[in-house]
Image (tube, rainbow, N blue to C red):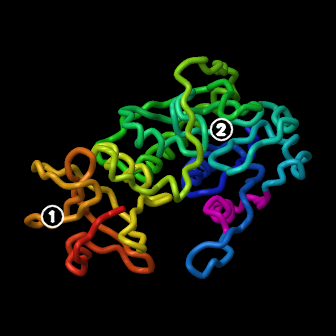
Amino acid sequence: MRIAFAGTPDVAVPVLDALVSSGHEIAFVITRPDAPAGRGRVLTPSPVSLSAQEHNIECFKTTDLVSLTAQLAEVDCVVVVAFGAMVPSNLLSVPKHGWINVHFSLLPHWRGAAPVQNAIKAGDDVTGVSAFQIDAGLDTGPVLGSIATSIRAGETSGELLDRLAIEGAALMVATLSALESGNIQAVPQPTFGISLAPKISKDDARVNWQLPALAIERHIRAMTPEPGAWTMVGEQRIKLAPVSLATQVIHLAPGEVVKIENQILVGTASHAVVLAEVTQAGRNQVDAIQWFSNQSDVTFE
């Protein structure tokens, strides 16, 4: 098949690489324009842009999809992975097989921008990846295929997303082959079991120490690495790496931080959690014990 690919972040690259290796013709790639990155805020190409360059594929850096109408009419379908912009409804039927999106959940669960973070935060045991035809709604189109996988104990959203990207690559290659041979039919999503996964802001990533320990452990894993779980010590913001549940029964007030034996413990609404690493603003990540040695009378807010 002659296809176009639309994507932006690292998670989209395995799918693009797999499509190149599969033998399908990649006519062109669409990605978001270069964006400021790092402390110097230097304009930086997206990971998908860099991958397209490595494969010598023409790349359009734009979110103005209407400007590419003529090019889109010349491909069989457009594969979309975390592109970061909505497809105008008048373009949906331009390619022969439409626009096919790789979404990192088992639809209709977790429709939206942050399915992986929300699945971990909610304590789901199972998630997966879906390939579906984009329609005018938000992740509401008919499903062409899916792969389920368990969420592992202690797994962060970044780690899970890396796994799902590999699964999504395999799913998309199989989906395109089935489309080409006519051996696949899109199935409408059920009207029950729908959940939404809106974009998560930095403010949303703040830890609420009034929650039970298990909810806090899930929250921090869900926010790792992006946007990064954090808390406050006075006027100082502290970024937190994933924590574990304390094995001993320790009664601490929510947010109270103490050192017991060789562990740094923090109180919650239930039992304590154990800190691993912390990062103060403008500094490198350090072991929690090393960080605590320079503190006195600490409370997380």
Give the Cα separation between the discs numbered 2 and 1. Answer: 45 Å
In the figure, 59 relative to 175: above or below? Answer: below
Residue 50 belongs to magenta span? yes
Residue 72 belongs to magenta span? no
> Which residue type carries mark 1?
Gln
Q: Is residue 240 visible?
A: yes
Quadrant of the rendered image containing residue 176: top right
Image disc number at residue 263: 1
- Image quarter of the N terminus: top right
Q: Position of residue 239 (x, y in %)?
A: 39, 66
> Residue visible at 43% across and 76% down?
281
Disc 2 target residue? 101
* Mark 2 and mark 1 residues within 8 Å of each other at the beta carbon: no
199 vs 69, left or right, is left
Quadrant of the rendered image containing residue 87: top right
Q: Please tell me whether mark 1 sits on a helix, a strand or a loop.
A: strand
In the figure, 12 relative to 40: above or below? Answer: above
Image disc number at residue 245: none
> Residue visible at 77% across and 32% down?
136
Q: Is residue 173 visible?
A: no
Q: Nearer the viewer, residue 145 or 254?
A: 254
- Image quarter of the C terminus: bottom left
274 vs 119, left or right, is left
Q: Position of residue 202 (x, y in %)?
A: 52, 59
Q: Position of residue 60 (x, y in %)?
A: 79, 59
Q: Please tell me whether mark 2 sits on a helix, a strand or a loop.
A: strand
Question: Which residue in the rendered view is the most extreme toward the left?
Answer: 261
Between disc 2 and disc 1, the foreground one is 1
**Count of picture labels:** 2
92 vs 79, left or right, is right
